[in-house]
Amino acid sequence: MVLSVGVVAHDRRKREMADWLEKHKDVFANMRIFATGTTGRVLQERFTELDVQPLKSGPFGGDQQLGSMIAHGELQAMFFFTDPMTPQPHDVDVRALIRLANMYEVPIACNQSTADLLISNPRFEEICEQYRDHSPEQVFADYSNRQV
């Protein structure tokens, strides 16, 4: 099965993301890439051979679109190069997206070194598939079954 991955980069990290993807485009050639608006446009312009599906821009709901894909089991990994030095107007959306990735056991890399570790792992696809049907409702059953 083809993996679907999210690719996001804050403005100051977009060039770094595109350069990083260039080094690994042979791996990404076998994946569907879902990217927030501007990141998606940058990737489409640079990588016409890759399957890049742009979503809305992050502040306009793109982060939430990716979060919805995670919650519905439609995204198996995420590469999100964040800018820790610039305040983001949609910071709550970014935090929610990272929270969902953690809840649903979606591998997420927020910097280049972690992205390198993730994508170079010979078991990358196997691990992504292993957690495809992960159910946080089972892991957090005490929350799901709480009395209110």
Image (tube, helix red, strand yellow):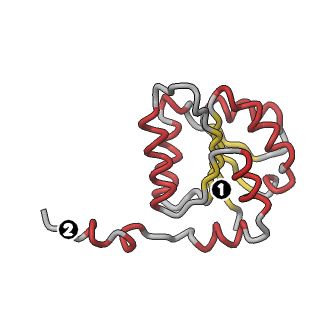
Give the residue drawn at x 71%, y 63%.
2
Which residue lies under the disc numbered 1? Answer: 4
Give whichever of 100, 50 is nearer the camera.
Answer: 100
> Looking at the picture, how far across and down is residue 6, in whole percent?
63, 48
> Looking at the picture, how far across and down is residue 45, in whole percent?
80, 31
Give the side of residue 31 with respect to residue 57, left or right: right
Q: Quadrant of the C terminus?
A: bottom left
Which residue lies under the disc numbered 2? Answer: 146
Q: In which quadrant of the rendered view does residue 48 lie? A: top right
Give the residue drawn at x 53%, y 46%.
66
Q: Is residue 11 above or below residue 6?
A: above
The kind of secondary structure element at disc 2 is: loop
Give the residue drawn at x 80%, y 42%.
20
Contact flag, marks 2 and 1 (Cβ < 8 Å): no
Tell me how far mark 2 sits from mark 1, CA to CA.
33 Å
Given the image, on which type of amino acid does mark 1 rest?
Ser
Give the residue drawn at x 65%, y 70%.
127
- Given the current orientation, which residue lies at the most extreme left position? 148
Q: Quadrant of the N terminus?
A: bottom right
Give the side of residue 120 with respect to residue 37, left or right: right
Neighbour class for label 2 at 10 Å: few (<14), some, many (≥20)? few
Q: Nearer the viewer, mark 2 or mark 1?
A: 2
Give whichever of 138, 75 is nearer the camera.
Answer: 138
Q: In the rendered structure, which disc, 2 or 1, sits on the residue that comes first in sequence?
A: 1
Q: Is residue 62 above or below residue 125?
A: above
The kind of secondary structure element at disc 1 is: strand
> Looking at the picture, how far across and down is residue 99, in whole percent?
45, 51
> Looking at the picture, how far across and down is residue 35, in whole percent?
64, 41
Given the image, on which type of amino acid does mark 2 rest?
Arg
